[in-house]
Amino acid sequence: MKPRIIRRGLLDELSFERLQRTIGPLLLAETYARRGIREAKQLEYDINKLPSPEGLPGLIPAAQRLFLALNNGERVALIADCAPGAAYSLAVAYRGLRDMGMDVRYYLQSSKRERFGLSRQMVDQAFEDHAPHLIVAIDHGTGSSEGVAHANGLGAEVIISDYHHPSGTRPDAVAIVNPALPENTFPAQHLCGAAVAYSIVSALRALAHHREHPAGDYEARWLLDIVATATIAAKMPLDPCNRHLAGSGLRIIGAGFACPGLQALFDVAQRPMFSAGSADLSEEIHPRISAGFHHGDLHLVIDCLLSEDEELAKTLARDLDDSYARATALEQSMLEEAMEQLDDPTRLSATVYAEHWPESMMSTLAGRLAERLHRPVIALTSVGGWLQGAAYSMSPFDLCDAFDTLQRQGSRVLIDHRQLRNHVELTADHWNRPRLADRFEEAVAEQVGGKVPVPVIYSDSDPGLDGLSLDLALAVEAGGPWGDGFEEPTFDSRFLVVNQRSAGAADEHTLYTLIPAGTPEPTKHQVEAIHRYCPRSMAAPQVGQTVRMVYRLRVARHEGGKRLQLQVLAMGSIEEVTEVA
């Protein structure tokens, strides 16, 4: 189905007139005005402008209990979820508590199959190794009544630092710090796990300062490099609070004060830190973190983020880069296999399966397919006799509602699931795979009214020849942070395709040479575009075609030089533009 372009309209003409006097280029001022910015000072990101976090459920009792542990020299164990996002949260919590003088050790859940929560096995391991007085569950635990009760029975109290939607009975923990709880009154409703951990560390520092404890001198803001990376990587809505967190973290990275692990990752990705932007974090740094977590040693990522030794950090970053190259090649193979399974274009959803696919790649595969198909997708593999997988959807489909319904049906179609913001991790009976696909299709049909929604792509404008400039790309790069809810400027134009070739270590990208349609000087106005994770075998446009393209502006850097590059979001046969009122 052809996607339809919808142009964003100006929300406030007066805001635009005010912004264009203080912000250049003009197209960037228009972008801000379309995103509700009324004056330039709203773009001055400062962690000190965050509202008081006291409305975050459980934060005050968590800080009080941690201060007691700090003051009394108690042993503390951090037990983190088995997911890339938890690596950031664990790094923030561990660095903060360690540097304030806490006797702390960390542990990683050994497998997703430990049922998405604080497991008895990990509690036992922590006790055998460290005999903690206090356990902090990182990025999980809100529904882990059994694991918390087991820890309590062994003599340890539990604090939960989480951001997942609550399900089941709340555990008997000292505190559950989770912005997804219904009683949350903190203005930021969509903090990632690392931001929750940062809030706890900051609250502890503030309490220590109030009590005149030496830990009160700790500068928690130096943790914001990781918080920014996690916020952008998790695609959290960039409301004002998250923009302050991400913007402050990017400023620390750009000033050269990122932790050695992040510095080393920027080096292997060949991206300069001084110009660090949202795209660097989401397209270069996080993919290497994720690949290392899924395809290397689980502790490799943590060791890299926690390393204080620059040479060791460089070695670990190179290992992560190698994992990223292997993961990219595997991802392309899986994507082609999955596309071959889709033989019914009338279905509203897609469910794909292969026994040999690695469990760790299911979320990535489901996400890639959903972006390509503009339909909700489940990707499944076989692990130990069970189906393990992930579901992913682009808005406006509500995955959480669909899977809650499947869970309530009680027909063992779904054994277990965990809801994240835009995807779901799930476990199901192997023999129930066809019924799971059918029930998922029914849930999608009920939500969308039985019709395949026309894919919609939002665009700010056609920038024209003058707008296709390196200066505008540099201004956009520096003008973030960009992300969900505060989208990076997106443009649409017609181009003549004059060349295409493969790019990337695994030929996972397609590079185009394009000429803007109707230009009087074709040679002068040639521009390069890259369609990431779209190999030539899947690239629809051919040389000689004139196509409409939706794209973002990028700055390509090589050997000290800079040039404009367009990043393709959609390309080919696209319906005409619909203006937004």
Image (tube, helix red, strand yellow):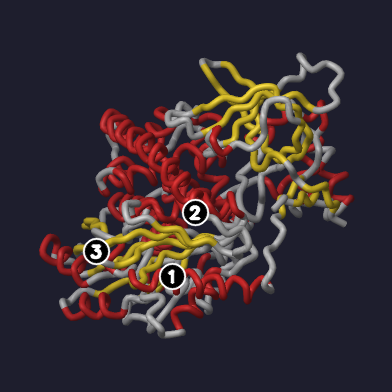
Q: Among all residues in the image, which is located at the extreme front?
A: 343
Vertical arrangement, residue 158 with respect to residue 217, above or below: below
Residue 17 picture location, percent across and down: 88, 44
Is any part of residue 59 visible from this angle? no
Residue behind mark 1: 434
Where, quadrant-wise, is the C terminus in this rendering? Answer: bottom right
Residue behind mark 3: 384
Answer few, some or many: residues within 10 Å of disc 3's Cα (few below 14, many 20 plus, some between 14 and 19).
few
Nearer the N terminus, badge 3 or badge 1?
3
- Mark-to-mark CA distance, 2 and 3: 29 Å
Q: Nearer the viewer, mark 2 or mark 3?
A: 3
- Mark-to-mark CA distance, 1 and 2: 31 Å
Q: Residue at x 43, y 70 (%)?
A: 434
Please, what is the three-letter code of the amino acid marked with disc 3?
Gly
Q: For this view, does 322 lie left or right of residue 483? A: left
Residue behind mark 2: 234
